[in-house]
Image: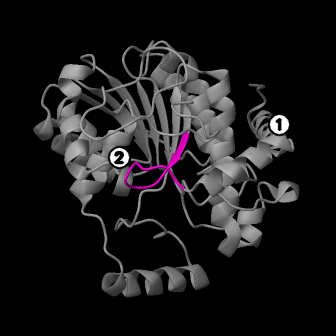
Amino acid sequence: MVTLSTVQASNSSIATSLPDGIVGVFVGATSGIGEHALKAFVQQVKNPKIYFVGRSQEAADRIIPECKQLNPSGQYIFIKADVSLLKNVDDVCQQILAKEESINLLFQTQGTMLMDKTSEGLPYAYVLPVTSRILFALNLLPAIQKAVGLKRVVSIFAGGYEGPFNEKEWAEFAVKKPLKARGHLASMITMANNVMAKRAPDVSFIHNYPGAVKTAFGKDVKGTMAVLRATFNFVGNFVINYLPPEECGALQLYGATSARFPPSAGDAAGVPLSGDATVARGTDGKLGSGSYTINYDNENVSPEIDEHLAKAKADGAEERMWAHILQEIEQVTGKAR
């Protein structure tokens, strides 16, 4: 097990182990886990340049001064956007790429419990954790591949909870069967990471389950879902041991920077391992293979998940899912990827 002391020691060596001026892109970081991770990153990186994307200007106006206080040498740029719309994702990426030749880290937490559809016709609960994140990664991948020291894409959702998926309803299943949505969406995220890790073997991809963290996730829901959320949050105060924000941030920063999760090729592994840490097992069952699904404590998930993913790959489901994603992106944006 990776101990908290090992996590803290690794994080404290970021400034001396990684280059100055690391560029990070945080999507969905105006609250919750994304904000915790962003601030942990700010505290440890030397002269960071951070783009963070979200809908709330009010939150950004609070976060930027807080980041400047944590690290006055950093640059903090907020881009206001609704990234449930794929055309907006393209626009945000264009804004970033117009200023940056290389990007070290893409860290994504955007999501919602809304069951409605966007103006582009995709369910919010599906497009934010899946297609929006994939499109960000595809657009920014060439710049990530040009980075030095660290090349990483992190998606926070439900690593380790990959489950049965419905190929006939890739986009609609989460809305029609919300209680079964987690396994379906988690499988899609990890399968997409697997494909991208093959396309960019010098970049590492992580799908992470963040553990129990108090956030405002789901605050925009209405009706029955709002009642269920309120009930869960109330009961959770008595039965769930929530991670403190600082510990959540530290764990996420470790996953985003440690050489425990190296790409399958190249030398941009991240902060060298120390203490009791070892290279993690990739989703293909091999050590250090570039695509990882991990728990909140940066440990590998059950081998049964690897078997589930291996079966999806072997029977062609992974490839069919990827074809669906590319077709979906092209239909909405008018551009093939």
- 222 sits to left or right of 168: left
Using the rendered image of the protein, determine whether residue 280 is visible from the camera's viewpoint. yes
For disc 1, the marked residue is 323
Closer to the camera in the image, 308 or 48: 308
Q: How is the image coloured?
A: one colour
Q: Residue at x 75, y 62 (%)?
A: 164
Residue 300 part of the magenta segment: yes
Q: Position of residue 113 (x, y in %)?
A: 57, 67
Whole-angstrom CA distance, mark 1 to mark 2, is: 30 Å
Q: Residue at x 26, y 44 (%)?
A: 7
Q: Residue at x 78, y 48 (%)?
A: 311
Q: Residues within 10 Å of mark 2 (few under 14, many from 20)?
A: many
Q: Quadrant of residue 162?
A: bottom right
Sequence-first tag of 1 and 2: 2
Residue 120 lies, with reference to residue 45, above or below; the image says: below
Q: Residue at x 30, y 27 (%)?
A: 271
